[in-house]
Amino acid sequence: MVRVEDAVDRVTAEPVFARSSVPHYAGAAMDGIAVRAEDTRAASEATPVVFELGTPDETVRPFTWVDTGNALPPWASAVVMVEKVHAAEGQATVGRSRPDRIAVRASAPCGQHVRRVGEDVGASESLLPRGHRVRPYDVGALLAAGVGEIAVRPLPVVAIVPTGDELIEPGAPLAPGRIVEFNSRMIAALVRQWGGEPIRLAPVRDDLGAIRARLAEAISAADVVCVIAGSSAGEHDFTPAALSGFGEILAHGIDVMPGRPAILATIAPSQNDAAGSGRARVAIGVPGYPVSAVVVCRELLAPLLAHLAGAATPIAPSIRAVLPSLLASRPGQEELVRVALGEVAGRLIARPLARGAGAITTITRADGLVRVPADVDLLEPESEVDVELLRPLEDVLGTIVVAGNDPALALLEDHLRAVSPRFKLATSALGSFAGLQAIARGQAHVAAVSVLAPAGGPTDRSAFDGALGDTSVSIVHVASRELGWVVAPENPLRFSGVHDLTREEVRFLNRPPGSGTRAFLEALLARENVETSRVAGWERAETSSAAIAGAVRSGLADVGLATRACATMLGVDFVPVAREDLDLVLRGDFAESEAGRALVDAIRTEAFRSSVATLPGYDAERTGRAKSS
């Protein structure tokens, strides 16, 4: 039993009935006068009927003044709204004054503007059914009907057991091979959101005996046990063996990606008896990769919690959208693809995000999920798909789709949302040419572009015509940024310029065809008479400056062309080459919209200009200036 005020989001364990009628008295539904309906029967414009303030007797027609919600006197059966009440002869005008004698010029049927007893709900009438998740407005109905507390289903308790020798607690010093344990906190938050009560146990090392002991502890404390990691087929994957010692494994591996290594197991009652107060009957082996963990929890844990709470299985709201590009999938298993959504030129566009199971930030950036069935291996560009929403539709409709990415855009989004919270940026790692094509095809609102020549050239409409065609655009300068070679800390290979790319020991990492940086480099090589065939790694490409710097920092490449800001962010050295303009190219229709105007206004604020100037290698002197379009 819980107090009604504390019952929001709880699930009713039995039907709830009204203890009193609502309303519990006959009351006025309008400001005016309470009368006997039969006394008004002869009233008309030609023959008004006069009433006197008071109670019934044999000589007068009585009335009393009432306000909305006032109880009617027992003799009254109708209310005449104040706008229809007129002063009788010799009385003050009806308005702020309330005369003792009034005239009525129209009949009032019995019950006019009267809220009868039980009009909303009658005593003992059903208010809420069993299995109903209580909403804020249910609280009002329950209290109005005299219900102070209700019976609810117990919150399903979920014990969460992280496993792995590599785990460290948030805030502990980082070291190679050590991973911050955040999956259990994330799953605990999902459990609370889905109406359960999480118990997060301390991480346990990769040892079969230790995991079994921790499972026994979890089984005794919870209704459901989630074991994180150790469900694959590696040398230290002990979760299947540990769970099989407590019951039966129903499934090891499910046909969904990401999330395939998941385990579903039952816990035998005899094991619960041995554990004393044990009560768990179900265990889920959750993969350690965070996106896989989210998918498995959505697919298995969420409906299980709804079942245990006696509520309907949650169904995510969905919406139709268009894929801007080819989407390939592995046949034989269903794939849940994370997408960013945005309404461009009257169409909802679903742009797929990175698909790695360990890329947790793709979930935070995703607006929804596209389910690719197991028997489908290819979805063509411009295909319509159903998207299961991960955030409210109003957030989706406020998304500004930006083809391209840069640290300055994160600052821009912050300044935009400070004054226009309903707008957000959804960026993607597209090169300049591909971004302009996305604008022309109606797949993006904005492209972040940089077009360079070896000497550093201006970006204007003439540089973009090949990609834009006749699409109307506006061009706004964001910043000038420094471009150069990113190399390992302390530059161990002593890399100094373009000719060093041909050295046998230098592994180069390029940008994709169609990017402004690659176009600049191709022109630079041609000027220095360096053939691309002599550059080891010319065909290897990453989609962003940050990815280039990250690869160099990880030892996967020796050199690449990127911005000073990304080199600083990833802790690698930088050899400057040139400066380039970072500009935003806005579709003409978007530039004229409320969102487009808000975006440009944010670029032109002094606050944004000042914040951009703090980025390493950035110059904000011309920030916000319009360019020839």
Image (cartoon, grey):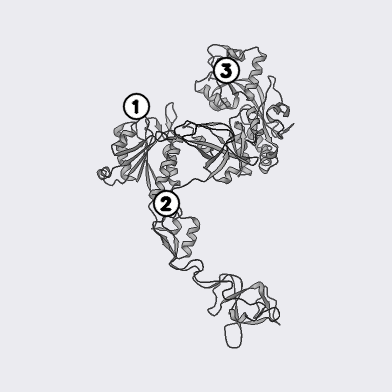
Q: Amino acid at mark 2?
A: Ala
- Label 1: element kind: loop
562, above or below 78, in the image: above
Select label 3 or label 2 by which is in front: 2
Question: Which disc, if any, is residue 311?
Answer: 2
Residue 609 x %, y %: 66, 35
Q: Please identify the dominant SS of the magenta region.
A: loop
The residue located at (50%, 20%) in the rendering is 556
Quadrant of the rendering where the N terminus is positioned: bottom left
Distance between the alpha carbons at the discs numbered 1 and 2: 40 Å
Q: Report helix, strand or loop for mark 3.
A: loop
Residue 36: x percent and y percent? 58, 80
Q: Quadrant of residue 171?
A: top left
* First of labels 1, 2 by sequence position: 1
What type is the residue that disc 1 sits on?
Answer: Glu
SS under mark 2: loop
Residue at far front of view = 375
* Left or right, 432 with reference to 229: right
Query: What's the mark number on residue 244?
Result: none
Q: Is residue 463 above or below residue 345?
A: above
For mark 3, what is the residue?
538
Q: Amino acid at mark 3?
A: Trp
The quarter of the rendered structure image containing the C terminus is top right
Q: Which numbered mark, 1 or 2, is in the foreground of this view? A: 2
Give the label on residue 235, or none.
1
- Magenta part of the protein: which range? 107-116
Query: Which residue does the image show at 51% across and 66% down from the upper left?
Result: 120
Q: Residues within 10 Å of mark 2 (few under 14, many from 20)?
A: many
Q: Residues within 10 Å of mark 1 (few under 14, many from 20)?
A: few
Q: Report, in whole angstroms, how far the alpha carbon at label 3 lies from the one at label 2.
A: 57 Å
Mark positioned earlier in the residue sequence (3 or 2):
2
